[in-house]
Amino acid sequence: MSQTPSNMIPLGSTAPDFELPDTASGLIMSLSDLRSDTATVLMFICNHCPFVKHLQTQLVAVANNYKNKGINFVAISSNDATHYPADAPEFMKLEAETLHYPFPYLYDETQDVAKAYQAACTPDFYIFDANLTCVYRGQFDDSRPGTDIPVTGQDLSAALDAIIAGEPVNADQKPSIGCNIKWK
């Protein structure tokens, strides 16, 4: 299991807009359509990565908790589905339905969106404030597959709690660790 850290784009970066198909609805969705007036969590995930599988259940719980507080979540898979067929759109749709994803699961076939965000791994998390300014990029929490550390979403949740409270997000952030994005 390869371990790739996230690139940690500079805090204050502006979120690049995009238009991608949602694998569940078939609709083309843009960041402009999906953004929140409070904060938007953008995450690069995929179906087959053990790091993503490790936190999926808690990720759904965290997303369900915060969507009621005005936070929108958006998942994107940018993996090469030709060489990694488990990450193809039809299987993404099935994954989203099976796990009851409370967020759209978009497919970045060209990988242009992953490149625009400098995404490196799955999972890779970003939080953008109401102005689409990056206030958090990094890990979900300290848990990894094969460790005894429970999956809580503590790091992501702490950043979201600060935003909701109108406080600055702690700039001491740890990179996410996961499988590298499967580039074409």
Image: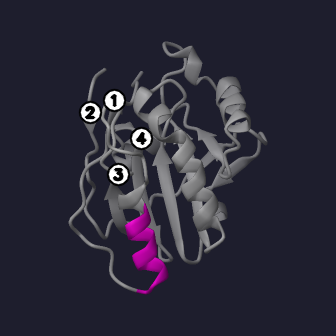
Residue displayed at 55% across by 28% down: 47
In the picture shown, does residue 47 fall above or below 7?
A: above
Quadrant for residue 86, please give it. top right
Image spot of residue 12 (x, y percent)? 31, 70
Look at mark 2 in the image and give the residue it sits on: 4
Look at mark 3 in the image and give the residue it sits on: 141
Residue displayed at 49% across by 32% down: 53
Quadrant for residue 106, please give it. top right
Distance from Cα at disc 1 to Cα at disc 4: 9 Å
Question: If the image is split into quadrants, where does the N terminus sit?
Answer: top left
Image spot of residue 83 (x, y percent)? 48, 12
User: Helix, strand, or loop for circle 2?
Assistant: strand
User: Helix, strand, or loop for circle 4?
Assistant: loop
User: Helix, strand, or loop for circle 1?
Assistant: strand
Give the prevailing secondary structure in the magenta stretch. helix
Extreme residue in the front direction: 148
